[in-house]
Amino acid sequence: MIDKAIHALTEPRRRDILYLVNDGELTSSAIASHFEISAPAISQHLKVLEEAGLVVVRRAGTKRFYGIRREGFAELKQYIESFWDDSLLRLKAAAEEEERRQHETKSKQ
Amino acid sequence: MIDKAIHALTEPRRRDILYLVNDGELTSSAIASHFEISAPAISQHLKVLEEAGLVVVRRAGTKRFYGIRREGFAELKQYIESFWDDSLLRLKAAAEEEERRQHETKSKQ
DNA sequence: TCTTTATTTAAGTTGACACTTAATTAAGTG
DNA sequence: CACTTAATTAAGTGTCAACTTAAATAAAGA
């Protein structure tokens, strides 16, 4: 699911859609009205976002309201933060190593 | 630059390259030896990463050593964290709103 | 049931981009 | 100056996915 979520977020248009529905539930056509692309294109994006667990649908008559799925974002946030933490730890170590090297160089001058 | 950085990171192969050089500077060919794709393909990826400010080159004779550019990552981290913070604030507000609605419903039953 | 509204699914087109091989540049080395 | 090594640039290919229009589904109203 994390892989699907990351893939879903790599498309700028889908991030725009998420920003929109984050302000409150919207129907497919209401979302489409914010862009210049066709309704089917939006529908396809929504399908990707739904399968990635980032949005949920609530059906009401012929309308379908799309909204943010909080659990999906929570999982994703946790994953990305662990990635950052790990990555930053390595960067910190590298920075310290470099500093050590610079001190060594200076002492040899 | 942030846009370029995000775009650079959407390609899995480039993330793999970043993981590699994060452990220490590597030449283009050393990086290529870790994958099954051609040297030019790696070179093209490195160019994208460099233009996104995520790696830096150090020339030494015919060799070019690629390494992580910390400032680039710092900028990116800041951006993504602000995105998260903002996004989470809105999600928190939405969650509270929903809770209020549920209480209301219960009190009316 | 026929029509309208909301949306999706189907099918096909197009552009971006990650790759390839071949040619080129750049910097030593004999 | 040739030759080698390291890497890039050039040019072309194939794939994928974001889009299009047209057709299908699904629910509600006349």
Image: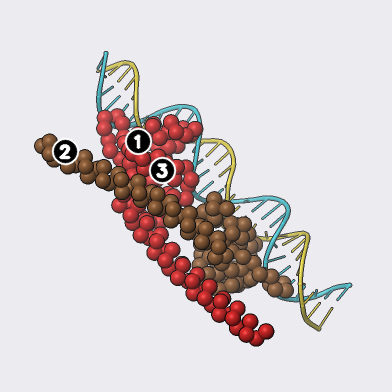
Chain colours: A red, B brown, C yellow, D cyan
Q: Where is the C terminus of chain B found, in terms of image quarters?
A: top left
Residue carrying label 2: B105
* Badge number at residue B103: none
| Above or below for B10 versus B57 | above
Which residue is drawn at the image coordinates 52% and 58% (left, top)?
B75
Query: Closest to the observer: A46 or B55?
Result: B55
Q: Position of residue A39 (x, y in %)?
A: 43, 32
Q: Position of residue A97 (x, y in %)?
A: 54, 77
Q: Residues within 10 Å of mark 3 (few under 14, many from 20)?
A: few
Residue carrying label 1: A26
- Dividing the picture into quarters, in which one does residue A76 lie? bottom left
Seen in the image, is D23 located left or right of residue B100? right
Asked if badge 1 and badge 2 are on a common chain, one would say no
Mark 1 residue element: strand
* Badge number at residue A19: 3
Examine the rendering and report whether any part of residue B42 can be seen. no
Which residue is drawn at the image coordinates 35% and 50% (left, top)?
B88
Which residue is drawn at the image coordinates 41% and 43% (left, top)?
A19
Q: Amino acid at mark 1?
A: Leu
| Above or below for A38 versus A22 | above
Query: Closest to the observer: A105 or B59?
Result: A105
